[in-house]
């Protein structure tokens, strides 16, 4: 067991060249620990006693640094929350409208790639926000069980598919049925139900989706009438 030896009659720090101010300061440092006692081995070298006091002070500084690092960071959490919202709105608005005419698959492959990127960034920002706030909570609903059963069933059918690569990644004309796309939609659903807390924000997302869908419908109607705004 550790015990203090300041009361030893045969050894005195003052008699060995250690000043009284140094002894008093080392006492205050030792008592600053949370109920911990340190054994000061008196020595004939003043430098060793100074080194011991320095090590204790350095240990206190490291503990304070670790404590500060573990404190919540609301500013960074707020910034990550904005990133999550931007990714969600971008996915809702841009995915129905996005296309690249110079690629092999003009619509599906590009839409899937954009949706995967936005969902991945949103999920990372959401997890980072939870880490900054030092708390992670999930909403509770019976609908989560339905989504989970559907996801697990889709995973099982993908694992036992005759063409696993086609079922997992998809192919031109079948991107919407690939496992990666379904997993991205499940992750998107999880982020939405845990970040959208108020009805106002939910209505804004629905309105943004409807506005984007109206633009897609107008473009399709023009093509049916033989009008091609982009020449194809």
Image (cartoon, rainbow, N blue to C red):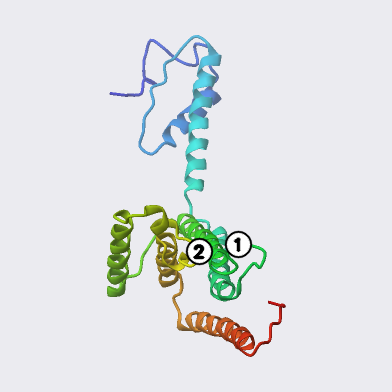
The answer to whether mark 1 and mark 2 are in CB contact below 8 A is yes
Query: Which residue lies at the image location 27% right of the left edge and 69% below the top edge?
Result: 145
User: Could you tell me residue 188's position as x and y percent?
Assistant: 45, 67
Disc 2: CA contacts within 10 A as few (<14), some (14-19) or many (>=20): few
Q: Which sits in the foreground, 68 or 190?
A: 190
Mark 2, residue position: 172
Q: Residue furthest front?
A: 226
User: Could you tell me residue 204's position as x and y percent?
Assistant: 53, 82
Q: Which sits in the foreground, 82 or 211?
A: 211
Mark 1, residue position: 104
Disc 1: CA contacts within 10 A as few (<14), some (14-19) or many (>=20): few
The circle drawn on residue 213 is: none
Q: Which sits in the foreground, 7 or 154?
A: 154
The vertical placement of 171 against 10, above or below, is: below
- Kindly state the secondary structure of the residue where label 1 is placed: loop
Query: Which residue lies at the image location 33% right of the left edge and 58% below the top edge?
Result: 158
User: Could you tell me residue 152's position as x and y percent?
Assistant: 29, 61
- Kindly state the secondary structure of the residue where label 2 is placed: loop
**Of callouts 1 and 2, which one flags the residue occurring earlier in the amino acid sequence?**
1
Query: Which residue lies at the image location 36% right of the left edge and 29% below the top edge?
Result: 37
The vertical placement of 45 against 118, above or below, is: above
Query: Which residue lies at the image location 56% right of the left edge and 75% below the top edge?
Result: 96
Q: Is residue 126 left or right of residue 114?
A: left
User: Could you tell me residue 55's position as x and y percent?
Assistant: 50, 26
Residue 135 seen by the camera: no
């Amino acid at each position: 067991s550790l015990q203090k030896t300041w009361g030893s009659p045969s050894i005195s720090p003052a008699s060995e060249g250690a000043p009284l101010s140094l002894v008093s300061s080392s006492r205050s440092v030792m008592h600053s620990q949370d109920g911990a006692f340190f054994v000061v081995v008196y020595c004939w070298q003043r430098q060793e006693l100074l080194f011991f006091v320095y090590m204790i002070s350095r240990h206190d500084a490291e503990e304070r640094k670790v404590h500060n690092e573990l404190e919540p960071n609301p500013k960074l959490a707020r910034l990550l929350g904005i990133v999550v919202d931007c990714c969600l709105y971008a996915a809702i608005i841009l995915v129905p409208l996005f296309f690249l005419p110079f690629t092999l698959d003009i619509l599906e492959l590009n839409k899937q790639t954009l949706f995967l990127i936005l969902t991945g960034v949103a999920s990372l920002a959401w997890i980072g926000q939870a880490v900054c706030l030092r708390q992670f909570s999930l909403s509770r609903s019976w609908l989560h069980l339905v989504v989970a059963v559907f996801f697990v069933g889709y995973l099982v059918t993908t694992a036992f598919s005759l063409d696993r690569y086609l079922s997992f990644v998809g192919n031109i004309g079948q991107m919407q049925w690939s496992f990666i796309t379904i997993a991205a939609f499940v992750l998107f659903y999880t982020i939405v139900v845990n970040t959208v807390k108020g009805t106002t924000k939910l209505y804004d997302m629905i309105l943004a989706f409807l506005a984007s869908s109206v633009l897609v419908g107008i473009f399709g109607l023009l093509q049916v009438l033989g009008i091609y705004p982009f020449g194809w």
